[in-house]
Amino acid sequence: MNNIYDVIIIGSGPAGLSAAIYSARARLKTLILERSKVGGQIVITDEVANYPGSIKDATGPSLIGRMEEQVESFGAERKKDNIKQVDFTGKIKKLKGEKEEYYAKSIIIATGANPRKIGCPGENELIGKGVSYCATCDAEFFEDLEVFVVGGGDSAIEEAIYLTKFAKKVTIVHRRDELRAAKSIQEKAFKNPKIEIKWNSVITEIKGDGIVQSAVFKDTKTGELSEYFADEEDGTFGIFVFVGYLPTNQLVKELVDIDEAGYIITNDKMETNIEGVFAAGDIREKPLRQVVTAAADGAIAAVQAEKYIENNFEE
Ligand code: NAP
């Protein structure tokens, strides 16, 4: 156990990167562990208009790119590994990855959340073949095609607006007769001539042979089912799903306190119920999941980790 970090951060979205900036800048031996891609959900966002100080036309990837530069300039170490097991029982915490084992005096969990699925037959089989959870990633494949967007929150409506730059028509499918999205976002959508809204509707099945060819809709008021088939000339259409997110808590859900929805419960110092283990960003039970709140959580967690180490490890 000779390579003990002061702080290991699991996850490299805005919360993790912000924690790394604060931790490395405080001269703590810091490691940030990334599973696959850096950046978390924000890298699939085309526009970051509400992050204070955002420059015009800032995109998720450009913002994350600047955060990464900061992390590197302060000297935090970065490794790609998929952590499979954690042991928080001792004073030194242990993490077991696919590639290596890691040890740290403190841990910051910043594993974020992942898109929730509709959960209907055909959805999994047709991911990447017409079904998508990321407009920025996949919109271009639907140039001049029809697209359905499932959901009525901020994400669904913002992404529907974005998709109108590519698709010939965008139909928002919402299970109620009123959107959840902020009024300002709704107004933009209502004004967009390419957007239609299919109220009181859900998709109950997606069908297609290697590509989306039809979808079954259910009227949530009457229960009536109807099947929509792709335009003959197009042969296919898109289904973009934005029905909320699920916390990425598999690694720690048996160890730390979580709420009913699976988000980690912390106090305002980002402390979990386990000493030396902090949580930051979308994984945490909180009222607003945004880049700005994730970055703030990361900063607080890192500063608290520093205090924890000072109080518990100084010779
Ligand atoms: P959300 O606010 O939880 O909205 C999820 C939407 O999906 C709701 O309209 C919900 O319907 C619908 N839904 C949930 N389960 C469904 C199912 N099984 N079938 C059909 N529809 C279903 O999620 P979000 O839009 O991803 O936003 C997440 C958070 O990020 C929110 O706090 C949001 O404000 C924030 N956000 C902010 C911005 C921004 O400020 N620019 C952009 C994106 C996200 P009901 O309405 O009927 O519940």
Image (spheres, rainbow, N blue to C red):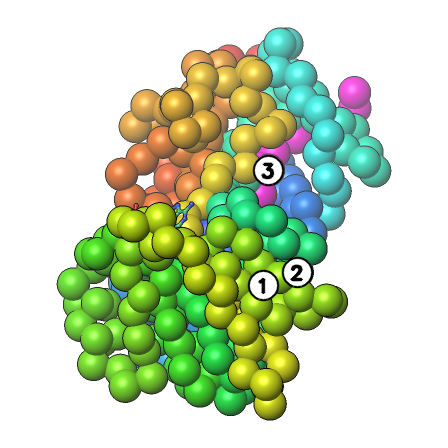
Comparing 64 with 142, the one in front is 142
Q: Residue at x 34, y 27 (%)?
A: 269
Rendered image: mark on residue 307 = none
The spot of residue 104 in percent (x, y) is 64, 25
The answer, for residue 310, to whether it is visible in the render is no
Q: Residue at x 49, y 37 (%)?
A: 247
Q: Please tell me whether residue 6 belongs to the stretch shown in magenta.
A: yes
Q: Residue furthest right?
A: 99
Location of mark 2 (residue)? 126
Secondary structure beneath dot 1 equals strand
Comparing 26 with 35, the one in front is 35
Rendered image: mark on residue 10 = 3
Up the image or down, 65 lies above or below 252; here it is below
Q: Verify CB contact (< 8 Å) between mark 3 and mark 2.
A: no
Q: Verify CB contact (< 8 Å) between mark 2 and mark 1.
A: yes
Q: Residue at x 64, y 9 (%)?
A: 90
Q: Residues within 10 Å of mark 3 (few under 14, many from 20)?
A: many
- Most common secondary structure along the magenta stretch: strand
Q: CA distance from mark 3 to mark 2?
A: 31 Å
> Is 270 placed left or right of 139 in the picture?
left
